[in-house]
Amino acid sequence: MKVYRKQLRKIVVNNTLFLYVVDEQAYDIVIRVYSNSLKSTFVEFDVAWKDTGDIFVHESRLISNLIQYAIRQGWDYQQKNNKMRFNNANSM
């Protein structure tokens, strides 16, 4: 039986503090990154369990790269209620 869990962690990217949660669900892993100053602003990445064999989803370098990718795609972490979602993020 698999035990699913959520872990809240902090990370600094480009001198900005972010909070992120790795939510291990039944069929996928959801990584949600929040702006530290605005809790209503976040970006979410979905990764299928079957594709995580060689991916360490808790690795800070991976999270940092995902945050930078989201910012390049137009996620403004300083704007209130700004939400972005990437389905099938394992292709990134």
Image (cartoon, rainbow, N blue to C red):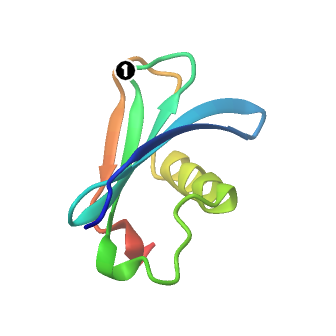
Residue 40 in the image: state x and y as whole percent. Answer: 37, 20
Q: Which residue is found at the position 41% from the left and 34% from the top?
A: 42
Is any atom of residue 19 visible in this view?
Answer: yes
User: In this view, which residue lies farthest toward the front?
Assistant: 1
Mark 1, Cα crowd under 10 Å, few <14 / some 14-19 / many 20+, is some
Residue 78 in the image: state x and y as whole percent. Answer: 53, 23
Say which element carries label 1.
loop
Please indicate whether residue 13 sits to the left or right of residue 34 in the image: right
Total numbered badges shown on the rendered structure: 1
Q: Label 1: which residue?
A: 40
| Kind of residue at disc 1 | Ser
Quadrant of the image for the C terminus?
bottom left
Residue 3 in the image: state x and y as whole percent. Answer: 32, 57
Q: Nearer the viewer, residue 74 or 56?
A: 56
Please indicate whether residue 73 sits to the left or right of residue 28 in the image: right
Which quadrant of the view contains residue 2? Answer: bottom left
Q: Which residue is found at the position 56% from the left and 16% from the top?
A: 37
Q: Is residue 72 above or below residue 79?
A: below
Q: Which residue is found at the position 31% from the left and 48% from the top?
A: 85
Please indicate whether residue 42 sits to the left or right of residue 56 in the image: left
Q: Which residue is found at the position 36% from the left and 47% from the top?
A: 44
User: In this view, which residue lies farthest toward the right?
Assistant: 15
User: In this view, which residue lies farthest toward the left?
Assistant: 27
Quadrant of the image for the N terminus?
bottom left
Is any atom of residue 75 visible in this view?
Answer: no
